[in-house]
Image (spheres, helix red, strand yellow):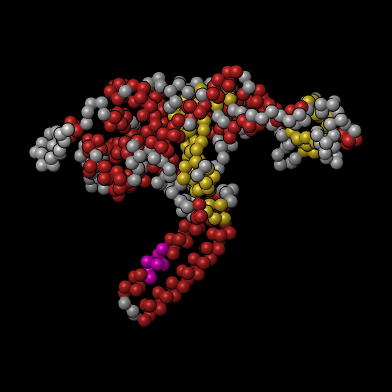
Amino acid sequence: MAYRFGNRHQMVLLPQSIEEYVAEDDPVRAYDAFVEALDFNALGIDINPHKVGNAQYDPKAMAKLLVYGYSYGVKSSRKLERETHHNLAFIWLMGGLKPDHKTIAEFRRKNKNSIQQVLKQCARMCIKLDLIAGNVLFVDGTKIRANASASRTHEKVWYQQQLKKVDQRIEQLLQECEGVDQQEQQLDSFVTMNKTLSKTKALKSTIQEVLSEFENSERQKINQTDPDCANMRSIQGKHASYNVQSVVDDKNGLIVHAEAVNDTSDLKQFARQINQANDVLAKPCETACADAGYADADELERIDAQEIDVVVPSKRQAQRKEPEPFSKKAFKYDKEQDCYYCPEGHKLRLSTIEKKTGGKRYIITDKNLCFNCQHWGVCTTGKSGRKTFRSRNEDLVEKFEAKYNTQDAQEIYAKRKARVEHPYGHMKRNLKTDAFLMRGRDGVQAETSLLATCFNLVRMMSIFGVPGLIQKIVST
């Protein structure tokens, strides 16, 4: 069989114009059309072609570079710079512009707040294209590592000790500088000492900022590298991470809202995430669904009070275990008398009320009833007889458990994994997101917005095709 050989000296290697570098149905054209359709004034980026002063790169071109780069797992500024020199799709997208890595990094850093709004505009574009219905919303979270080490996370006492050491070091350096000046030694050593002093003062400033963060929050530990992240446990172990929350619409599995938070659990996130998604939709959804990690009755009540159906299993429902013969489920609660009755009909009266949680503890009226009961040793072995506990919002828990057990709720919950976990799989595997590049919550939120937008664009291309999506975007 004959071989085909390449020829680097071929005279006509590329088309005559950059426009001919990519085919009409190349996905890069959809990314280009999407960014062109964004309202940059609403994003907070000024587009003024008549600007005077030093020339700068077109903000639209820079935004295209970031969106397209993230969509293929190319995130670092140096790699993006390299792509503008070697990748034909990037060359076409940029129209031949080749910004250096510092320019790319500075654009991303200076426009963090603007980039955060890209997902909102993308979601509203999907609403106009009838891709997002906003009837059923699914919430879920995943841990993504921060650009920081878990070993750099310390308590307040540690920072106070380091501040004392830094103050002592600054005092020492000032004395050394004074001695060098008096002895009129070579300038090089004095300059080096000044650099050391400057770095030490910068470290002091960082420590003071972290200490002020302790005063302004209830956090017990703060990371020195990225004060906004937190140590979290995941399948990969314990790392400095962010808890990335996303709200996904049921119709086509598109992301309505995404946010990076530093709460180590999802327990207090349900109402916040659903409300923010409803703001994007400009209407309340009909049903909100999540797994048992969000089963906080107070959080669920905030959404239920808006006449939104809540489909969230409790911890005991998620475990799918049959209740024990003498668990609290076997005891009957009398709301009027505020007491329980055991399976044998004996009364458990109210004993104490916890001040912090508002929970109530109940105890058998006569311990001898338990001692003489046929179920003694199985129901309880306590010296005071049988006891039980009722949380402050037990009524709500029972209400949401009953709702979850309905057939309609079960059908909705069955779709949850396929809808809400799909985006995370795409972000982590296809977009190669094992950690964030930027530090601080604003930077991480900007990256989260880009990742979620990239997922939505891929789904939109799957639904309409590249030419069809471009036509839809242009016509909206």
Which residue is drawn at the image coordinates 45% and 34% (left, top)? 424
Splitting the image into 4 quarters, where does residue 57 fall?
Answer: top left
Which residue is drawn at the image coordinates 47% and 52% (left, top)? 149
Q: Is residue 194 magenta?
A: yes
Residue 394 lies left or right of residue 47; in this view the side is right
Residue 321 spot, x, y in % from top left: 66, 30
Q: Quadrant of the N terminus?
A: top left
Residue 379 spot, x, y in % from top left: 80, 33
Which residue is drawn at the image coordinates 41% and 28% (left, top)? 123
Decide: is 417 above or below 260.
Answer: above
Front residue (pair 45, 460): 460
Q: Is residue 142 magenta?
A: no
Which residue is drawn at the image coordinates 40% and 78% (left, top)? 179
Residue range in magenta is 193-199
Residue 430 spot, x, y in % from top left: 38, 36
Decide: is 241 above or below 274.
Answer: below
Question: Extreme top residue here?
Answer: 407
Q: Quadrant of the C terminus?
A: top left
Q: Can residue 53 be seen at all in this image of the molecule?
A: no
Residue 205 lies left or right of residue 295; in this view the side is left
Question: Extreme front residue here?
Answer: 1
Q: Can residue 234 be seen at all in this image of the molecule?
A: yes
